[in-house]
Image (cartoon, grey):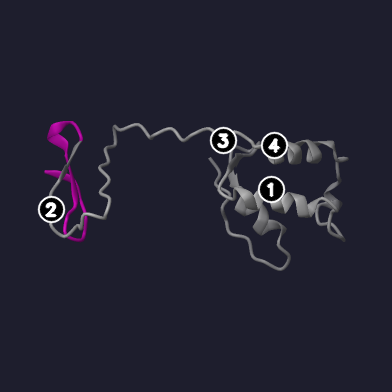
Amino acid sequence: MPLFNAPYPSILTVDASVSGEVRTVDESHISGKEMVTYVSDSSPCPRSKKHRPIESEADLAALLLAKAPYSLEQIVPAEEDVDFGYFKQVLLANPKVLHLGAGKYDLDNEFFLELATPRKWVSSKVWYR
């Protein structure tokens, strides 16, 4: 008996009797241009390629680390920081880079750009573990 059957014409099924093997049930409605992904609960997740910071990202990190610490009252500045243009330029160059925060949550460059955009609602991309 399959563990999983799609509600639409089945593409994949998982057969529990064959140690989680994933088999195609019906691919007649799939064109040659579509990709079919075979999934197993015992398959390890493919490791993503480690991000190697480019020179501008390293420069930005050094610039931000060199700034004086700020108090909680200063978290929303009255005027734009002189380095904001550079910050925005670097983050826009690679918006999908993920950062693991101290609280063990993932944030990407798009999140920081949304957060820095005035009068814009920010999505709830912060995922707690």
- Residue identified by numbered label 1: 90
* Amino acid on which disc 3 is placed: His
Kindly identify the residue that appears in the image at 67 percent across and 66 percent down: 120
Asked if residue 6 lies in the magenta stretch, the reply is yes
Residue neighbourhood size for the residue with mark 3, other residues' Cα within 10 Å, grouped as few (<14), some (14–19), many (≥20): few
Q: Are marks 1 and 3 in contact (CB under 8 Å)?
A: no
Q: Are marks 2 and 3 in contact (CB under 8 Å)?
A: no
Q: Are marks 2 and 4 in contact (CB under 8 Å)?
A: no
- Residue identified by numbered label 3: 51
Separation of residues labelled 1 and 4 (CA atoms): 10 Å
Separation of residues labelled 3 and 4 (CA atoms): 13 Å
* Amino acid on which disc 2 is placed: Asp
Residue neighbourhood size for the residue with mark 1, other residues' Cα within 10 Å, grouped as few (<14), some (14–19), many (≥20): some
Label for residue 77? none
Kindly identify the residue that appears in the image at 70 percent across and 52 percent down: 89
Mark toward the start of the polypeptide (2 vs 1): 2
Judge by depth and name the residue closer to the eye, 110 or 14.
Answer: 110
Residue neighbourhood size for the residue with mark 4, other residues' Cα within 10 Å, grouped as few (<14), some (14–19), many (≥20): few
Q: Are marks 2 and 1 in contact (CB under 8 Å)?
A: no
Give the residues drawn in magenta, as a range.
Answer: 1-20
- Residue identified by numbered label 2: 26
Residue 51 percent coordinates (x, y): 56, 35
Separation of residues labelled 2 and 1 (CA atoms): 46 Å
